[in-house]
Amino acid sequence: MQKQRNECVLQCVSLESPVGELLLSGCEKGVHTITITMETEHRSGLISNQAELNSELRQCVTWLQSYFRSAQSVSSLPFPALHNPLLQGDSFTAQVLRILQSRVQVGQTVSYKELSEMAGNPKAARAVGSVMKRNPVPLIVPCHRVLCSSGQTGRYMGGKGDNIKLWLLSHEKKEGLDLTA
């Protein structure tokens, strides 16, 4: 466990998923980060016994496990609490991430331009792309559902995760959902 400047006591846990290892960090107030990694090296400081996790990280692990079993199943679950500075306040970044999380549901997609319009700034499509790049909690805030206006997927994780984005979209679509909404 580590203390951050804001006195959060961080816990970290690793979770295997169909898209690779997920590294979660968070405190008693909520999840700070989710990192999708393609590396398998051992990391120190990870909690292996989920009973030792704070309730917010346990809820996030449960949410993610449910998502990977059946993407549609999470629509009936509360979102895990999030506690990352990028998600706090009224900044454009926080606003875009909150809109994406709350309004673009499982099986739906949105373009960068449409998301900028939803955030009240129709000329900020490139800025929305920058926000997606800095999303600290992918999957919970579903940046994989944001596409180019042409319908192309764009670069996920700087291009290293394009196959992950395609898998996530396919995972949501195979449950008979419309990905063009």
Image (tube, rainbow, N blue to C red):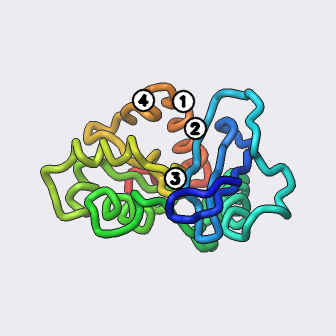
Residue type at the position of mark 2: Trp
The residue identified by callout 1 is: 163
Residue type at the position of mark 4: Gly
The residue identified by callout 2 is: 167
Report the quarter where the C terminus lies.
Answer: bottom left
The residue identified by callout 4 is: 158
The residue identified by callout 3 is: 137
Q: Of discs 4 and 1, which sits in the foreground?
A: 4
Residue shown at 40%/45% (left/top)? 134
Q: Are marks 2 and 1 in contact (CB under 8 Å)?
A: yes
Residue 117 place in picture, x, y as percent:
20, 59
Residue type at the position of mark 1: Asn
Residue shown at 31%/64% (left/top)? 95
Specify whether 173 is left or right of 180. right
Question: How many angstroms separate mark 4 from mark 1 (CA)?
Answer: 12 Å
Residue 120 place in picture, x, y as percent:
18, 64
Dot 2 surroundings within 10 Å: few (below 14), some, or many (20 or more)? some
Question: How many angstroms separate mark 2 from mark 1 (CA)?
Answer: 6 Å
Q: Of discs 4 and 2, which sits in the foreground?
A: 4
SS at mark 3 in the image: loop
Q: Of discs 3 and 1, which sits in the foreground?
A: 3
Residue shown at 66%/68% (left/top)? 56
